[in-house]
Image (tube, grey):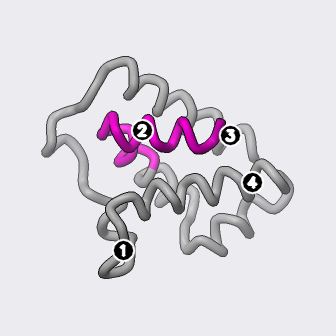
Amino acid sequence: MTRKLLLPAVLLLAGACAKGERTEGAMLDSAAAMAPAGASADAGVERAVAVYRGIEANPAAAESVLTAHGLTAATLDSLIYEIAADSARAAAYTDAIR
């Protein structure tokens, strides 16, 4: 389960960094929609990093980690795509998980 969640996220971000930014309207702003009002612009990145670290620390509890962060596998995918669409956010995520 862990490899299934982490590998696509890393591949998406690596591809986003290599390709640069996508067009602004290409994807929904799911990170902004999931972030509470008044949250920082990088709240989605912080949430994705927290999920990554939680799953890395306890792979058997991947579903519990997602639930604790208010996510499902589908919403995590949406969040990762949103981060990958912005090269600055993708770089911040990549740097944070190193």
Horizontal placement of 79 versus 4: left or right? left
Spatial CA span between label 3 and label 4 = 11 Å
Quarter of the image where one finds residue 4: top right
Q: Earlier in the sequence, mark 2 or mark 3?
A: 3
Residue type at mark 1 is Ala
Spatial CA span between label 2 and label 1 = 18 Å
Give the vertical position of 89 relative to 48 (above or below).
above
Residue type at mark 2 is Ala
Label 4 SS: helix
Label 1 SS: loop
Quarter of the image where one finds residue 58: bottom right
In the image, which disc is placed on residue 10? none
Where does label 2 land, which residue? 90
Q: Residue furthest bottom?
A: 37
Asked if the stretch drawn in magenta spans residue 51, the answer is no
Tell me the residue at 43%/64% (across/down): 43
Where does label 3 land, which residue? 4
Residue type at mark 3 is Lys
Image spot of residue 1 (x, y percent): 75, 47
Q: Residues within 10 Å of mark 4 (few under 14, many from 20)?
A: many
Label 3 SS: helix
Q: Are marks 2 and 3 in contact (CB under 8 Å)?
A: no
Where does label 4 land, which residue? 55
Segment colored magenta? 80-98
Magenta residues, dominant SS class? helix
Residue type at mark 4 is Ile
